[in-house]
Image (tube, rainbow, N blue to C red):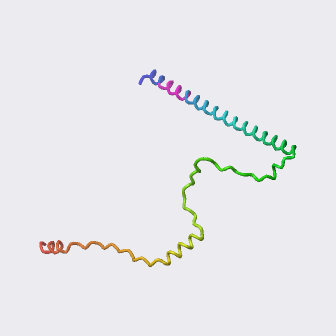
Amino acid sequence: MTLLKKDDVYKHLTEKIYTRCQQIQAENDRSIMRVNEIKKLLRRRAYDVMLLKSKLDKHGDNWRAVPMMVPQPKGKPEQKRRGPKPKSKQIASNVTAEVQDVAPRKPRKQRVKPQPNTHQMQSQHIST
């Protein structure tokens, strides 16, 4: 490779790195703007809640004594994480009682190792 080609390759790679850094910087700026926007929304919500509470108290509304009802979410419920199901004590005691009532199981048959063929062994002894 000549010296000019090496310089061109180096220049090309540095330009690619520079453009990638600019892309990352723009992405970071967008993320920061979104976080700041959400913080602003949360501050506005807290301020609105505070104003609403003060107005309700000023009008003598008995809103603090009313029980809160949590609305049920619409749509599919979230899928629970996998894991063993916890067994209740009542179910576990019923299962053990049922197991004791069942007749004992027969033991499993043990595997038997195959015996070497005695006919082949005898023929080997005879031929030697």
Q: Residue at x 12, y 72 (%)?
A: 127
Question: Residue 57's spot in the image, x, y percent?
Answer: 85, 45
Q: To which quarter of the image does residue 58 belong?
A: top right
Q: In this view, does 116 lie to the left or right of 108?
A: left
Q: Residue at x 20, y 72 (%)?
A: 117
Q: Which of 42 and 29 is in front in this view?
A: 42
Give the number of marks: 0
* Magenta run includes residue 16: yes
**Image vertical order of residue 64 relative to residue 86, above or below:** above
Q: Which of 51 and 75 is in front in this view?
A: 75
Q: Which residue is drawn at 33% across and 72% down?
A: 111
Please report the bounds of the magenta region as a residue range: 9-18
Q: Nearer the viewer, residue 56 or 4?
A: 56
**Image vertical order of residue 69 relative to residue 95, above or below:** above
Question: Residue 4's spot in the image, x, y percent?
Answer: 46, 21
**Image vertical order of residue 50 relative to residue 16, above or below:** below
Quadrant occupied by the C terminus: bottom left
**Image vertical order of residue 73 relative to residue 126, above or below:** above
Question: Residue 33's spot in the image, x, y percent?
Answer: 67, 33
Q: Residue at x 54, y 56 (%)?
A: 82
Q: In this view, does 89 lie to the left or right of 3?
A: right
Question: Residue 1's spot in the image, x, y percent?
Answer: 41, 25
- Name the residue at the top extreme: 4
Q: In this view, does 43 lie to the left or right of 61?
A: left
Q: To which quarter of the image does residue 103 belong?
A: bottom left
